[in-house]
């Protein structure tokens, strides 16, 4: 059975507003998260991802309120990540109405957290987000943490296998080299990760047009593809992307 491919808009939320940057910097305002969530739901998005990029405790409290407000409007699943460091944090976000939580830095620092979350809530709730950058000395991709600021000793392909074994239900894979550049997803990275694990892989970083989504699925073997700015700034729509994919024979929802 061919699983249908998913199109997932991503909202980076800081202090209650949606923002967007290039290669993780130069943030600009992109609107109200509840309005955008409603808009994407109506547009036919399959899921939504919310990433909380507020560093402050105040920002975290705002985020729980935002999650509640969005959950009351949405019929599609949504994943929340950013600043989730413990089982209690996961409970708080899932109780507020999220369907899945995404762990990034916290999972790298404490891999057992994936196992804890997975045994408590089920692996379908656990998304492990990986920020990857090609390292020429290493000859492969390296895992970065803290919003892409800190290089780790972990190699992406090793880490993705470990995360899957620990109970991750899904991998959200961001290519830092491609993020915000709009030149297409990193197909080599996406394909390597998709072939390394049996759980679904969401390609992220670099979407510029509908064709890039088709490439992520056909060449990159991703199960889902995520984008932010091209949707927020109406450069294309979920609808247009889905129409294009259908024309290419890609099975979508």
Image: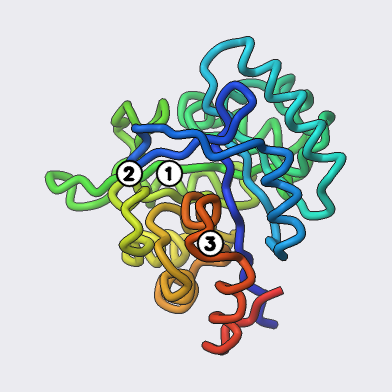
How far apart are labels 3 and 1 at the CA level? Answer: 20 Å
Is 187 left, or right, of 9 in this rendering? left
Foreground of the two, 52 or 238: 238
Residue 209 is situated, as x and y percent measured from the top left of the image, at 43, 68
Residue assigned mark 3: 225
Foreground of the two, 173 or 159: 173
Is 132 located above or below residue 53 in the figure? below
What residue is drawn where x is 37% and y is 36%? 24
Which is nearer the N-term, disc 3 or disc 1? 1
Residue 76 is situated, as x and y percent measured from the top left of the image, at 78, 54
Q: Are marks 1 and 2 in contact (CB under 8 Å)?
A: yes
Q: Secondary structure at mark 3?
A: strand
Quarter of the picture containing the C terminus is bottom right
What residue is drawn where x is 53% and y is 61%? 225
Q: Secondary structure at mark 1?
A: helix
Is 24 located above or below residue 243 in the figure? above
Foreground of the two, 242 or 82: 242
What residue is drawn where x is 66% and y is 76%? 252
Residue 138 is situated, as x and y percent measured from the top left of the image, at 18, 45
Residue assigned mark 2: 155
How far apart are labels 1 and 2 at the CA level? Answer: 6 Å
Which is nearer the N-term, disc 2 or disc 3? 2
Residue 63 is situated, as x and y percent measured from the top left of the image, at 68, 24
Q: Secondary structure at mark 2?
A: strand
Q: Nearer the viewer, mark 3 or mark 1?
A: 3
How far apart are labels 2 and 3 at the CA level? Answer: 22 Å
Q: Quadrant of residue 186?
A: bottom left
Is 189 left, or right, of 201 in this rendering? left
Quarter of the picture containing the N terminus is bottom right
Q: Quadrant of residue 119?
A: top right
Residue assigned mark 1: 159
What residue is drawn where x is 76% and y is 60%? 42
């Amino acid at each position: 059975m061919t699983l249908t491919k998913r199109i997932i808009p991503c909202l980076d939320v800081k202090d209650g507003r949606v923002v967007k940057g290039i290669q993780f910097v130069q943030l600009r305002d992109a609107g109200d998260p509840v309005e955008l969530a409603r808009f994407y739901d109506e547009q036919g998005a399959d899921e939504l991802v919310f990433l909380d990029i507020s560093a402050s405790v105040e920002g975290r409290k705002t985020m729980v309120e935002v999650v509640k407000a969005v959950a009351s409007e949405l019929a599609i699943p949504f994943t929340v990540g950013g600043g989730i460091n413990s089982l209690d944090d996961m409970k708080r976000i899932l109780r507020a109405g999220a369907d899945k939580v995404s762990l990034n830095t916290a999972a790298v620092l404490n891999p057992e957290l994936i196992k804890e979350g997975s045994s408590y809530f089920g692996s379908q709730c656990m998304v492990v987000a990986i920020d990857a950058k090609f390292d020429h000395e290493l000859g492969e991709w390296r895992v970065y943490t803290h919003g892409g600021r800190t290089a780790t000793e972990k190699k992406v392909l090793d880490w993705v296998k470990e995360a899957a074994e620990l109970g991750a239900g899904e991998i959200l894979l961001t290519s830092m080299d491609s993020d915000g550049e709009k030149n297409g997803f990193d197909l080599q990275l996406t394909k390597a990760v998709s072939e390394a694990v049996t759980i679904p892989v969401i390609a992220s970083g670099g979407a510029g047009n509908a064709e890039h989504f088709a490439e992520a699925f056909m060449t990159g073997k991703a199960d889902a593809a995520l984008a932010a700015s091209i949707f927020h700034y109406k450069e294309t729509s979920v609808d247009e992307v889905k129409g294009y994919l259908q024309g290419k024979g890609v099975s979508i929802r």
